[in-house]
């Protein structure tokens, strides 16, 4: 019988706290705004600004969540945000797609120019 690594899906203490923090944001901010922004069919800039204020909408947060060795942190964040509202959740994490392309293929100058605006909500 071959013994390999054991797959553990239980969250550690940091992940559990992060899950609670994101869930609280989704419950307090995302869910109450969801219907309005869905009907408006617009980007929910005020919600993104709130997420940025608490550090949820930032390049550092997304990088740390994505680099977690267990591979569970980013899915936990997505699950909680999308519980609040899938469209708003995607607005918060969607810039990661562009950041990945810039990071993978960009020159140092392009990284400096394009990464900061890709991770900060515009002001109204």
Image (cartoon, rainbow, N blue to C red):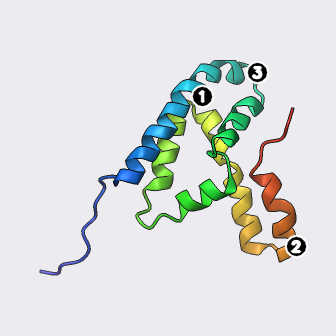
Which residue is depicted at the point 61% across and 54% down? 61
x and y percentages locating residue 24 in the rendered image: 49, 32
Residue 18, compared with residue 65, is above or below; it is above
Residue 102 vs residue 61, the one in the foreground = 61
Which residue is depicted at the point 61% across and 45% down? 56
Q: Earlier in the sequence, mark 2 or mark 1?
A: 1
Q: Secondary structure at mark 1?
A: helix
Q: Give the side of residue 80 with respect to residue 51, left or right.
A: left
Splitting the image into 4 quarters, where does residue 87 fall? top right
Tell me how far mark 1 sits from mark 3, CA to CA: 15 Å
Q: Earlier in the sequence, mark 1 or mark 3?
A: 1
Q: Residues within 10 Å of mark 2 (few under 14, many from 20)?
A: few
Q: Secondary structure at mark 2?
A: helix
Marks 1, 3: nearer the viewer: 1
Residue at label 3? 40
Q: Are marks 2 and 3 in contact (CB under 8 Å)?
A: no
Q: Are marks 2 and 1 in contact (CB under 8 Å)?
A: no
Q: Give the side of residue 17 with respect to residue 94, left or right.
A: left
Q: Give the side of residue 17 with respect to residue 25, left or right.
A: left
Tell me how far mark 2 sits from mark 3, CA to CA: 37 Å
Q: Is residue 91 visible?
A: no
Residue at label 2? 109
Residue at label 1? 30
Q: Give the side of residue 51 with respect to residue 73, left or right.
A: right
Q: Residues within 10 Å of mark 3 (few under 14, many from 20)?
A: few
Give the farthest residue toward the left. Answer: 1
x and y percentages locating residue 37 in the rendered image: 71, 23
């Amino acid at each position: 019988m071959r013994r390999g690594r054991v797959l553990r899906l239980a969250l550690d203490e940091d992940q559990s706290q992060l899950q609670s923090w994101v869930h609280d944001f989704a419950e307090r901010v995302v869910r109450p705004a969801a219907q309005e922004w869905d009907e408006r069919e617009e980007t929910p800039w005020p919600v993104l600004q709130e997420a940025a204020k608490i550090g949820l909408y930032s390049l550092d947060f997304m990088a740390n969540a994505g680099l977690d060795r267990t591979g569970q942190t980013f899915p936990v964040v997505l699950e909680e945000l999308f519980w609040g509202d899938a469209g708003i959740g995607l607005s918060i994490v969607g810039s990661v797609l562009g950041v990945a392309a810039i990071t993978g293929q960009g020159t140092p100058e392009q990284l400096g120019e394009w990464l900061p605006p890709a991770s900060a909500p515009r002001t109204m």
